[in-house]
Image: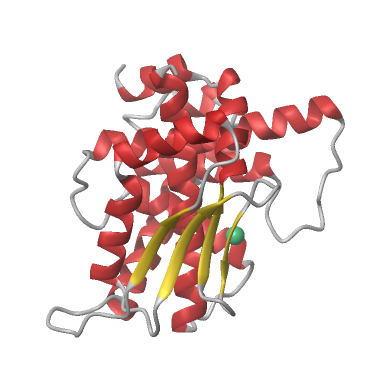
Amino acid sequence: MTTNRVEFVLGNAQFVLLHELAHLVIAEAGIPIIGREESAADHIAAMLLIRPPYPPSAGNNTLLKFALNAADGFGIAWQQGSNLGAVVRYWGTHSLTVQRFYTVSCLLYGSDPERFAALPEMVQMPMERAETCPVEYEKAAYAMDWLFATYARAEGDPPGAPMEIRFEPPPTRISQQLLEAVRNQGFIDDTFRRFSEVFALKAPATFIMRSCRQAQAAWLPETRELIFCYELLDTYWLLSQQQHREAIESLLDP
Ligand SMILES: [Zn+2]
């Protein structure tokens, strides 16, 4: 397995995990959301990678690369769907994947327009949109600070209920190998360790990686299970064939 393709899968998987944890926290804490929860979850996931609330053990660039790979994943998925003439879900609860691509790209650019000066042209984002990105980023940063100030555990607060982590057998040789890579990289353990420091669960919950015959992830409040399907890893592996690795590296290390 080439490291670059694995990195692409890891970045996308980390984004999905944070997106689903955002749903969990919104439901558990009853956080008021105006507008679409799916967009809020995307913003929260992107901002946790672009502007981590704590110094990340893996380093800032690793998280930025995760965010860039996640954006790339949305862009490639959109392109593939267009090539196949897939149904465009205008009515869906999620934004179109191409819009999710531009949301993450815009927050990245807005976080540091000097450092990411090449990004708008690279992703064909018109300057009139790019110019709004620093303000979009500032608003998101302000909201993230409010979120943490309002809902995060304060020092000395009792810990919440435990989150159990369970891995069921992967369905394919690729997902088996990717699971090993995921576990070696350690972002799942890291994410849940941070998560339990920051947020107090009201009752025990379980994170389960399993085969579900479809590429998806979800927080199921009834059973208190956060499901991550191995089929997602397989899907990102296939998408990674078209990753824009050089563009991403040139953005991070010009
Ligand atoms: Zn969602």
* Colouring mode (rainbow / by chain / secondary structure / one colour): secondary structure
Going by the picture, which residue comes out furthest to the front? 169
Left or right for 205, reference 172? left
Ligand 1 is found in the corner quadrant, namely: bottom right
Residue placed most toward the observer, 111 or 222: 222
Residue 142 lies, with reference to residue 113, above or below; the image says below
Percent position (x, y) of residue 58?
Answer: 22, 39
Q: Quadrant of the C terminus?
A: top left
Percent position (x, y) of residue 202?
Answer: 38, 85
Percent position (x, y) of residue 34?
Answer: 59, 75
Left or right for 55, reference 140? left
Percent position (x, y) of residue 174?
Answer: 54, 29
Q: Is residue 31 visible?
A: no
Residue placed most toward the observer, 245 or 3: 3
Q: Is residue 148 visible?
A: yes
Q: Quadrant of the N terminus?
A: top left
Going by the picture, which residue comes out furthest to the left? 156
- Which residue is pictured at 18% across the width and 84% down the height? 157
Residue placed most toward the observer, 172 or 242: 172
Residue 104 lies, with reference to residue 222, above or below; the image says above
- Which residue is pictured at 43% across the width and 36% down the height? 10
Count the labels in the image.
0
- Which residue is pictured at 48% across the width and 43% down the height? 13
Q: Quadrant of residue 38?
A: bottom right
Left or right for 209, reference 189? right
